[in-house]
Image: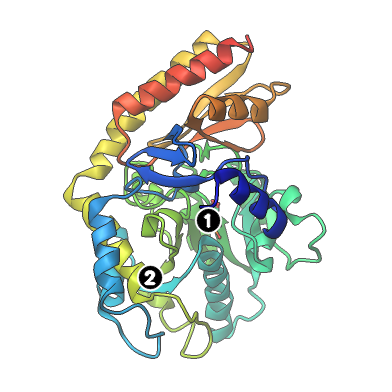
Amino acid sequence: MTTESELVRAGQTYLYPNYRQPPFVFVRGQGSLLFDGSGKRYLDMYAGIAVSTLGHAHPKLAQAIAEQAGKLLHVSNYFYNEPNVRLAEKLCGLSGMDRAFFCNSGTEAIEATLKLTRRHFFSKGEAERQRVIAFRNSFHGRTLGALAATGQEKYKDGFGPLPGVSHVGFGDIDAVRRAMGPDVAGILVEPLQGEGGVLPAPPGFLRELRALADASGALLLADEVQTGIGRTGTFLAFQGEGVQPDVVALAKALGGGVPIGAMLCRKFLQEALPPGSHGSTFGGNPLASAAALAVLEVLENEGLMVQVKQRGEELSALLAKLAAKFPKLVECARGRGLLQALVLREGVDARKVMGSLQEAGVLLTIAGGQALRFSPPLIVSKLELEEAAAILERALSTYA
Ligand SMILES: Cc1ncc(COP(=O)(O)O)c(C=O)c1O
């Protein structure tokens, strides 16, 4: 039998070295727990970067996947398949949108959003309307289009030239107003910047963006790849602000761990991408669609979004306590629902803190350089959050 250290060596030899994996291997999970090859237990407070909505090995998700795998895996979009049609209907109902296009990742959902935006104005005879306004510190994905929209230079280094996008300060409505013009096709925004450091948009900002977009005839494009599917306590974070975008990009938590992305749009955009203009071989396949349907069923039928609000309040109280206890190490606690962070001060080595948490059996990620990000499964319990916070408190004590 292959040992854990043999697997690590093979990974170090054969995998493309664009990541920085630690020297152990996860072999199974249960709820909010993960276990490595030596049997060590970890509290999963990151959910595979905000993906594992129902935690690990959820019986309803596992059953839906197994049943679908035994029935039909793939037919391509040349034909309808039942789980995909039902998923499109369900997503439109939950989001208040009218049409769903399916792909396989967040980046692809953003790419579809950008292409739809261009094509919409092209088909209206306004091909000069191409410019997109996006925000500094944003993250929208890794393909050249999604990367162009991303507002952080570190992700773009060495990949230029990229299509032009105007980046303005997140939350700065006057800067958006100044950047608007007759050539602006869309404003692309995360309601809460995830990778940028768990930064919620200031109150009223999304509403003001809606008004600016309406006034100039541009589209309001919501990147809910990280915030969608109940993570902030409403199905879309935009809904929490009472704002309706024209396009929404979803992925991550939608399949609970099975790759799937979606671009949802309003009815007036349904002719922008006619047959043949955009597509995806795997997009909307029966397996991923059945997984997403199972995730949405649990989310709705088991009151998960109400639970997220409750857990979110508990987590924010725990993080506020840590911020108050370690003022020299912690700048602030921020976030919403089950997407929150303890932001460490400049000069505190966030990677080192994350490493010592990993040693102690808690998995968190770093966003925006200094934010220790919590994005646990939505089924996480109060006790698990308390245990993670207690371990974080011990780790911070050693730096104080
Ligand atoms: C807001 C946002 N948009 C887009 C993406 C890209 O998604 P993916 O990694 O699935 O391509 C991410 C990934 O972190 C994200 O957080």
Residue at 39 percent of width and 47 percent of height = 237
In the rendered image, residue 340, in percent from the top left (x then y), is placed at 47, 33
Q: Is 271 rendered above or below residue 180?
A: below
Crowdedness of circle 2 by 10 Å Cα count: few (<14), some, many (20+)?
some
Viewer-proximal residue among 221 and 263: 263
Is 275 situated left or right of 310 in this image?
A: right
Amino acid under disc 2 = Arg
Amino acid under disc 1 = Leu
Viewer-proximal residue among 341 and 286: 286
In the rendered image, residue 373, in percent from the top left (x then y), is placed at 52, 34
Q: CA distance from mark 2 to mark 1?
A: 18 Å
Which image quadrant shows ligand 1?
bottom right
Residue 34, image quadrant: top left
Mark 1: which secondary structure? helix
Camera sees residue 274? yes
Mark 2: which secondary structure? loop
Residue at 56 percent of width and 78 percent of height = 121
- How many badges with numbers are in the image? 2
Is 182 situated left or right of 300 in this image?
A: right
In the rendered image, residue 113, in percent from the top left (x then y), is placed at 52, 69
Give me the disc on residue 221: none
Residue at 59 percent of width and 18 percent of height = 330
Residue at 48 percent of width and 57 percent of height = 222
Crowdedness of circle 1 by 10 Å Cα count: few (<14), some, many (20+)?
some
Which part of the image, by quadrant, shows the C terminus?
top right
Camera sees residue 138? no
* Residue highlighted by disc 2: 266
Give me the disc on residue 212: 1
Q: Is 354 rendered above or below residue 60?
A: above
Q: Is 126 rendered above or below residue 295?
A: below
In the rendered image, residue 292, in percent from the top left (x then y), is placed at 32, 62
Sequence-first tag of 2 and 1: 1
